[in-house]
Image (cartoon, rainbow, N blue to C red):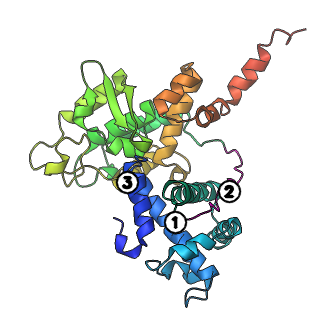
Amino acid sequence: MINQEDNPEFLNDFLAYSLTILNKSENSVKEYNYDIAHFLKFIKFKYKLTDVTDEEFIKTIKIDDFDLETLKKITLQDIHAFLQYLKTCYQSKPTTLARKASTIRIFFKYMCNKTKRIPNNPAQDLENPKLGQRLPKYLTLEQSKDLLEAAANHENNSSHGNHDNTERNFAMITILLNCGVRLSELIGINISDIDFENNKLNVIGKGNKERTIYLNNACMKAINSYLAVRPRDGVKFNSRDALFLSEQKQRISRRAVQYVVKEELKLAGIEKADKYSVHKLRHTAATLMYKYGNVDIRALQELLGHESISTTQIYTHVDNDQIRSAVEKNPLANM
């Protein structure tokens, strides 16, 4: 929950614009608030508009009194200094710096072009930090099968808490490994989102964009098995349509799903299980579909809900066996 009293009025206006006009999700708007608030605190520190003299305590600076005249003085060099501060003090990764740079660009575009509250846009020529291409981590086919087997076996399984949540956990992991949905998409699934006749599922992805996912037999079987034992009585009113419920009989939380996945990975005997996350299962699903399903890259983009094909193309680089095979199949290979 954003405490608007801690923000200057223009920041709250930007957040409202992002939520309504830009149709950003609540999570994205929270990130915008955190990033811009941190940036404004840094500016007050850099301009010596606060009693705080140590970089370590910049986050304690109050910004509710931040005025437009100070905002007008901000330069591109100030933004660069903020990114340098993040890298130095927080060891922020290039991906994190790129996200914060993007937020700052959107914010100043709003302040300068949309509302005309400032005459010049200091972020107009702001470049994204260069990202070194990193291949996504994913489970092998055998590891994926081991994970599903572990999830299906509830004996001595601590990830099921005080109750037997075998069917629920198995259904969640089956959907993650078969469909490649995001964590937020998984916990957001409602029973009414599922077309049981046509084996389809509607999910709400990034930017509140809706897309259709076709469910295979494994997913439908797992979902139906869970629905047969899903609690019916005592479910919290606002969670009655939620597919996956917690032991408190309300929509399952992000943290609960993350915990379940970590525990199931350990029980499956996956080496370095702590290094795998729910998001890694999304990478796994995409990689397995590309490697074994001969899935067209455009179809994979649609399935994963990627806005840009370049995001999806990373999965074309993860399979060295395919690269080796392609070279060996060159008609000139045996000349």
Determine the residue positioned at 32% across, 29% down: 201
Determine the residue positioned at 86% across, 10% down: 332
Range drawn in magenta: 117-134
Dot 2 alpha-carbon crowd within 10 angstroms: few under 14, some 14 to 19, many 20 or more? some
Q: In the image, 289: left or right of 6?
A: right
Determine the residue positioned at 38% across, 52% down: 19
Residue 163 versus residue 79 in the image, above or below: above
From this viewpoint, is residue 149 visible?
no
Residue holding disc 2: 126
Q: Looking at the rendering, which quadrant does residue 308 occupy?
A: top right
Q: Secondary structure at mark 1?
A: helix
| Disc marking residue 26 | 3
Residue holding disc 1: 36
The three-letter code of the residue at mark 1 reads Ile
The three-letter code of the residue at mark 3 reads Glu
Q: Earlier in the sequence, mark 2 or mark 3?
A: 3
> How far separated are the C-alphas under marks 2 and 1?
15 Å
Q: Nearer the viewer, residue 16 or 284?
A: 16
Q: In the image, 269: left or right of 185?
A: right
> How far separated are the C-alphas under marks 2 and 3?
26 Å
Q: Earlier in the sequence, mark 2 or mark 1?
A: 1
Q: Looking at this rendering, what residue extends furthest in the left direction? A: 233
Residue 77 versus residue 94 in the image, above or below: below
The three-letter code of the residue at mark 2 reads Leu
Q: Secondary structure at mark 3?
A: helix
Q: Measuring from the top left, give residue 23's x and y in whole percent.
A: 40, 46
Q: In the image, 62: left or right of 246?
A: right
Determine the residue positioned at 55% across, 24% down: 298
Residue 27 versus residue 310 in the image, above or below: below
